[in-house]
Amino acid sequence: DIQMTQSPSFLSASVGDRVTITCQASQDINNYVNWYQQKPGKAPKVLIYDAFNLETGVPSRYSGSGSGTHFTFTISSLQPEDIATYYCQQYDELPRVTFGGGTKVDIK
Amino acid sequence: EVQLVESGGRLIQPGGSLRLSCAASGFTFKNYAMHWVRQAPGKGLEWVSAISGNGANPDYADSVNGRFTVSKDISQNTLFLQMNTLRAEDTAVYFCVMGYNSGTYFDSWGQGTLVLVSS
């Protein structure tokens, strides 16, 4: 099975800061990565699909990049409503998918 | 509008069995693969199982293979997860999930149903 190593597991930043989360795949997965946001008590919500495509209605301060084994998710200017846990997910071996361990984002 | 509503979660003793249901609406159920994803308390997301649109080709995570069975009743627009020989480590919120706009990402999630395995 493909493993997704996500880092950091926790980060605290100020409003307006640029925030970056990374995911490393255990093998080449092309650009088959999605990124999700999960707020407490809620189901996850997709933000980025196919590594860099912004889901409809998602603010443009979110972005994704990468291919192969290294992927990055960025919030260009952190907002209070961005407090959440973020997950990467690979889908190179559908229907089997795997998620990264998650990054909890907090405001300083 | 796509709606997925899970039910069936409850407190169950180790070794017991439970069947989860997911009532689907707002799309042509037979045309879409469906998945179960779970989340243990305070932990991350874990893919559990999937089934193709026509109800064939079930697949399972190694952690549940041989104990869980996924199925679809297309006439009732309902997805099921039969869970047998439950263990404490199966304790989680179970989400019914699908990719409506694309089969490669999950844009539709239910609210989840909690399964608590404890004596």
Image (tube, coloured by chain):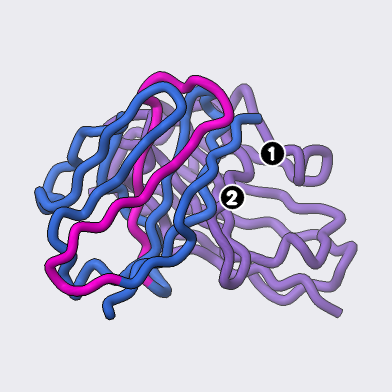
Type of amino acid at the residue the image marks with label 2: Glu
Image quarter in which the C terminus of chain A is found: bottom left
Q: Which residue is mark 1?
A: B61
Q: Give the mark, 2 or 1, whose residue is nearer the N terminus.
A: 2
Contact (CB < 8 A) between labels 2 and 1? yes
Q: CA distance from mark 2 to mark 1?
A: 9 Å
Image quarter in which the N terminus of chain A is found: top right
Residue shown at 45%/46% (left/top)?
B97
Q: Which residue is mark 2?
A: B46
What is the quadrant of residue B16 in the picture?
bottom right
Q: Which residues are magenta?
A: A13-39
The purple-tinted chain is B
Task: Work out whether residue A18 can be spotted.
Answer: yes
Left or right of residue B110, residue B20 in this image: right
The blue-tinted chain is A
Q: Is residue A61 above or below residue A94?
A: below
